[in-house]
Amino acid sequence: MFKVTAKNSRASKAGNPFRSSSSRRRFHDGLGTGLFAFFTYFILACVLGIIGKIVWDGAPVIFQDEAPFLNTDFFAKSPMTLHEFQNEERELIRLDQDDFVEFQKNNPEAVIVNEQTHSYSGGGILGPLVGTALLVLVCMLMALFVGISTAIYLVEYAGEGRFVSILRLAIMNLAGVPSIVFGLFGFAFFCLSPLFPVFTETPDWEKSLFAIPIWFTDGYFSFQGWGSSLIAGSATLAVMVLPVIVAACEESLKAVPKGFREASMALGATKWQCIRTAVLPYAVPGMLTASVLGITRVAGETAPIMFTAAVATKGKLPWQDAGGSGLSWLSNVLTQKVEALPYHIYNISKLPANQALDEMRYGAVLVFLLLVIGFALISVILRSHYRKKLKW
Amino acid sequence: MNESSKTPHGGKAIISIDDLSFSYDYGKTDVLRHISLDIPAGRVTAFIGPSGCGKSTLLRCLNRMNDLVDTAKITSGRIRILGQDIHAPDVEAIELRKHVGMLFQKYNPFPKSIYENVAYGLRVQGVKNKAILDQAVEESLQKAALWSEVKDRLDFSALGLSGGQQQRLCIARTIAVKPRIILMDEPCSALDPIATARIEELIAELHEDFTIVIVTHNMQQAARVSDQTAFFYLGELIEFDDTNTIFGNPKAKQTEDYISGRFG
């Protein structure tokens, strides 16, 4: 038998040739694994922390114990001033602006002591919610129309080449532009430049480049720029979301088997017939679902709408404020400023804190979060639905 | 010009290819070189040869399917179908394809109903009359030997059919447009032997009404279904003759080597 030396002692002592050779190596290995796992779970903790805090503080604002379990005032009223005062019995009373006016009218002799007013701390988020919904809707219509057209051109017509690569690169680069730059661009291009028409009976001749009278109405299409308005904000957001939409639509088009195109062309269809009947019907669901996700992202942007569309406070909803009828009503709705949820959150976050305002903040943020999650969910559900349905 | 490149029967040529060279890279390298070939009307002509020999490419030249490839270019020669040069400036590929139908390697019905699949070609040509469409769908499905199997479920998705049925549906879809010529690009390569046999039977029936050009990897299939066979190798037409001659007594050494399985 050979002598057990320090060198081979480990292997021979236990008779186990697979014993770990070095505790140091094992330690390093463990450290690496632990570190990677730590950062992963750290992110998870961040997400849970953020969402948890928002839900914890926001849920009491938008939900309530008794039916209908939803704080309807929060969704049915726009932001307004909160009046805080004590009555004869020194009870603390909080009333929204509209309720306060009502209260004073009904009880002219009521004693009001220590009255304090807190701006933006009362009411709800109806105005901002409606504004954001309209911004998203109009943005979606514009972005989908332009995005789908671009994707069809790139995939079906443009072919491959240096120029198309540069084109594609340019579109992709749009995604890297900071949102405030989009905001400034949108302000200069859509709001100020007289390239975009509004329909009005009284064109602003100082600003207007030219105006085309529309014969069946009293109005003109006046090229005087959109001004800071719903439509300008939507257009700015649409430009911003375009790279995402174009990429998503391109992918959806490419996912349609080449065989459909070949079969269609071989049956004597023109290129456009082929695209319309044998490609688009199978690509559109994918385009829509992917685009919804992209649009959710821009719905949360504040910078692009700050100059182009948003207003801090506004008495009425856009359609209540718009005068006229028919075309001029539509134009009036589209060319007025709107409140928007992200901008509203930004505004109320700047104000000095008080308890009521805090509730408004968390309520608004939670609704916003639910909205975004809702959109994402819709997109995921749609996608899995169509994946099952459109299989080939 | 090579003697064997004329119609073996001396019959009337419906497709006549003259000195055709073709490139997929703007003419840098030709994948087809100086092909001359006359395909007779009302018969089944098979293109055989090892992979990459250009037989599918040639087939796709015949209905200008290669127009869809940006880099494709005809570098010499011309193709005449029914006497008309198909690359003449006043020829529109879309009109040509109404007369020269095509069947693909992988059956590719649209994810529409069986009825809509067959009616597709007529619809894109602007036929809206329901009665005409109904009749065309029934006739085409009958000719494709599919009518009895699907007549009760015309509104069902075509993707619910078996592979062989889907390929026969594609045949019905092609013949609904009433082409003069049907090009088949390895129509059975994705099918099992029984489905293959049915397609081959169908080809035998169809060749009374249509001129059929079939590309196949399967030499037995070429021997079974075709009247004459063209053998291609490395982009060149090596031999074109009656199928019996090609398989029984080929003139070229390469043809003999290929059909006896020595390469390819």
Image (tube, coloured by chain):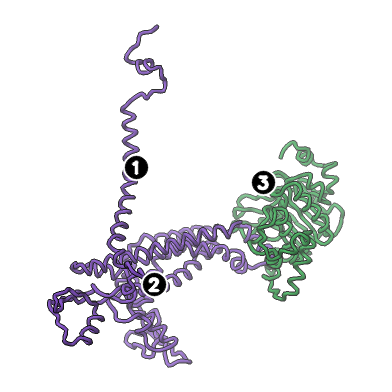
Chain colours: A purple, B green
Residue that carries the numbered disc 2 in the rendered image: A133
- Give the image location of residue B85, x and y in percent: 73, 64
Residue that carries the numbered disc 3 in the rendered image: B52
> What is the chain letter for disc 2?
A
In screen coordinates, is A216 left or right of B113?
Answer: left
Q: How many marks?
A: 3
- Give the image location of residue B94, x and y in percent: 68, 67
Q: Amino acid at mark 1?
A: Ala
- Give the image location of residue B156, x and y in percent: 67, 63
Q: Are marks 3 and 1 in contact (CB under 8 Å)?
A: no
**Can you say which quadrant of the picture contains the C terminus of chain B?**
top right
Q: CA distance from mark 3 to mark 1?
A: 51 Å
Structural crowding at the residue carrying mark 3, measured as other residues with C-alpha within 10 Å and reported as few (<14), some (14–19) or many (≥20) = few
- Give the image location of residue A314, x and y in percent: 29, 79
> What is the chain letter for disc 1?
A
Residue that appears at 41% across and 65% down: A295
Residue that appears at 44% across and 72% down: A142
Kindly report which numbered mark, 3 or 1, lies closer to the viewer in this rendering.
1
Quarter of the image for residue A350 reads bottom left
Q: CA distance from mark 2 to mark 1?
A: 40 Å
Q: Amino acid at mark 3?
A: Gly
Residue that carries the numbered disc 1 in the rendered image: A37
Which residue appears farthest toward the left when viewing the image?
Answer: A114
Quarter of the image for residue A245 reads bottom left
Which residue appears farthest toward the top when viewing the image?
Answer: A1
In this orientation, which residue lies closer to the viewer: A333 or B251? A333
